[in-house]
Image (spheres, rainbow, N blue to C red):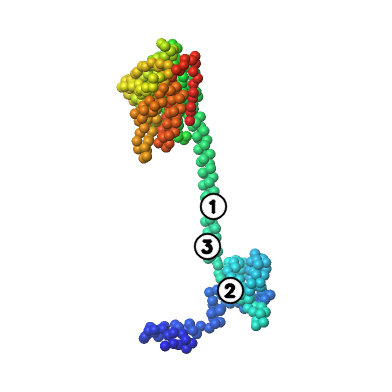
Amino acid sequence: MCRTGGVPEPTGTGDDEASTDAAFTALLEDSAENLYESAPCGYLSTMMDGTIAKINTTLLDWLGLDRADVAGRRRFADLLTIGGKLYHETHFAPLLRMQGELRGIALEMRRRDGGRLPVLVSAVVKYGTEGEPLLNRITVFDASDRRAYEKELLRRRQEAERARAEADEARRQAEADRARLADALAVLQRSLVPDSLPAVPGLETAVHYHTASPDQLGGDFYDLFPVAGGRWAFFLGDVCGKGPEAASLTSLTRYTLRAAAHHDPDPASALSTLNAVLHERYTGDGNPRYCTCIFGTVEPGGEHGGAVVRLASGGHPPALVLRADGRAEFLPTPGGLLIGVVPGAPIGTAETVLAPGDTLVLYTDGLTEARVGPARDDLYGEDALHAFATDHAPAAPHEVITALTGLLESFGDGLDDDTALLALGVPATPSVTAPATSHTS
């Protein structure tokens, strides 16, 4: 069953049906004039010159205007702000004449109180039977909420851009600070070890220093210098920790050993002096600091052109000797304790003779404790080092250091500790003075 005009009759019975009929009838009885005047958007019609012929109550209320002051008296452009007028004259009106319609144009209208009303405007041209334009029909939608939303988005975007710019500047500053710190640390690191090794008559020498991190001071150290009786003293070691405290301990260790060696070049005596100094300096304040160290003297020009080496060690990995006949052997210094832990710590000692073509190698545990294997969960170890040395013996000091440097590089990110290497050897062919070779990274 249908109502007049073909509108389907809602289903239902009783009071519910009567209520529905009443509401539906009220909608049908709403006049077109009321729909126009009370629409949720603004309506106006203008002549082709822009003069307003008709305007609805909604738009008048938005603008705070009286119908009598608008209809037949103002043009559509008169309701716009100065910027809106300029856009209307240069874009809106010409495009409407050419295209016959415009949709969703953003403009600003001026209220009576001077305020601005952001709006979205759509317009169509009504044509006569002969195709002549008669008038413009314009709808106006309040875009205040949309404009506020857009402004909020713009504000958030500007804040995000400022934050990004500030973050970029902070990152650039951090990178510059990091570079300056790295330069300062590099200078300080170089001050903790010799710039180069001195030339030793009758010996060849070579050294390599690998720093695991440019952002931290390393704790490995070494030195080579002359002492009384035509002998040369040398040492290599590793202090506990990283950073400024390690650097301070390294500096104290190095200069203590130099002073001790000039007073008494006996290796065990020098390490005993260092042990007493470190124990007294650091144990009393509850922050014990210690190091491993191997100290030796070498006296070139021995029988048949060899050199006598005497070593003392405090908790340090054993020295490695590559012999001229192709053998490689560790030179154990058993019984030595870490330097600085306890007073009167026992010092391990050893002695050997380097014949022509023999090379003595000292190293820190960064080499033997490098992580290897697919999962980086195995240590390189002394057995692998011994096999490596056997494969390269015999070799002069610079050849050994070059080979070991390549080995360190092969560890990649498995090498996460500082590593110092020092090699002393008697040339296979005697020479008055063999040059020192220094590698530092």
Which residue is denoted by mark 1 in the rendering? 161
Left or right: 362 as drawn, with respect to 185: left
Residue 118 position within the rendered picture, expressed as x and y whole percent measured from the top left:
58, 66
- Looking at the rendered structure, the kind of residue marked 1 is Glu
**Which quadrant holds residue 70?**
bottom right
**Considering the image in quadrants, where does the N terminus appear?**
bottom left
- Looking at the rendered structure, the kind of residue marked 2 is Thr
From mark 3 to mark 2, how far is it between C-alphas? 22 Å
**Which quadrant holds residue 392?**
top left
Residue drawn at (53%, 83%), measured in percent from left and top?
31
Q: What element carries label 3?
A: helix
The answer to which of 297 and 142 lies nearer the viewer is 297
Residue drawn at (66%, 80%), measured in percent from left and top?
131
Q: Is mark 1 on a helix, strand or loop?
A: helix
Is residue 276 among what the camera can see?
A: no
Q: 114 above or below 15?
A: above
Q: Are marks 3 and 1 in contact (CB under 8 Å)?
A: no
Residue drawn at (40%, 17%), measured in percent from left and top?
354
Which residue is denoted by mark 3 in the rendering? 149
Left or right: 199 as drawn, with respect to 283: right
Q: Mark on residue 139? A: 2
Please give the count of numbered marks on the rendered protein: 3
- Looking at the rendered structure, the kind of residue marked 3 is Tyr
- Which of labels 3 and 1 is toward the front? 1
Residue 6 position within the rendered picture, expressed as x and y whole percent measured from the top left:
47, 86
Q: How crowded is mark 3: few (under 14 residues within 10 Å), some or many (20 or more)?
A: few
Q: Mark on residue 404? A: none
